[in-house]
Amino acid sequence: MLDVGTAYLVAIGALLLVALGVGARALVAIFREGRERSRKRREDEIERYTEDPVYDRDPADPEAGGATPSTCPQCGAENAAGFVYCRECASPLGPNQ
């Protein structure tokens, strides 16, 4: 007769094998997609880089005159002068802040 502890271990082992199989399939799909994107970039089928004006801008120098704290347009939180994203809600503070 099969005791409860052994049945539990067999069930957990089977579930772990299923999870490993699903995870391996997902990782293989991610790897293949990455290789395909690299190939397309090499052949100039897709752009290599697109600039993001909010992310790529230079933060204000806090030592410079006129650097004032900015208020988040989304939540109204007060942020330091050099912040690009709000410290409370993580929304962009805007390109002119």
Image (cartoon, rainbow, N blue to C red):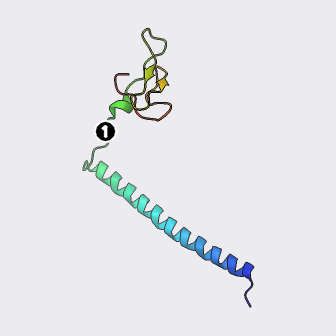
When the figure is inspected, residue 48 is found, relative to residue 57, above or below; the finding is below
Q: Residue at x 60, y 76 (%)?
A: 14
When the figure is inspected, residue 48 is found, relative to residue 73, above or below; the finding is below
Q: Residue at x 48, y 23 (%)?
A: 78
**Residue 68 point in image, percent of width and height:** 44, 15
**Residue 22 point in image, percent of width and height:** 49, 68
Q: Quadrant of residue 71?
A: top left
The answer to which of 1 and 22 lies nearer the viewer is 1
In what quadrant of the picture does the N terminus appear?
A: bottom right
**Residue 3 point in image, percent of width and height:** 75, 84
The residue positioned farthest toward the top in the image shown:
65
Q: Quadrant of residue 20?
A: bottom right
Q: Residue at x 33, y 31 (%)?
A: 53
Q: Which amino acid, by three-letter code, is at mark 1?
A: Thr
Q: Residue at x 72, y 87 (%)?
A: 2
The answer to which of 42 and 59 lies nearer the viewer is 59
Q: Is 68 on the left or on the right of 45, as rendered?
A: right
The residue labelled by disc 1 is 50
Q: Is 96 on the left or on the right of 82, as rendered?
A: left
The answer to which of 23 and 49 lies nearer the viewer is 23
Q: Rate crowding at label 1 as few (under 14), some (14 to 19) or many (20 or more) other CA atoms within 10 Å.
A: few
In what quadrant of the picture does the C terminus appear?
A: top left
Q: Quadrant of residue 39?
A: bottom left
Q: Is 94 on the left or on the right of 68, as rendered?
A: left
When the figure is inspected, residue 51 is found, relative to residue 82, above or below; the finding is below
The residue positioned farthest toward the bottom in the image shown:
1
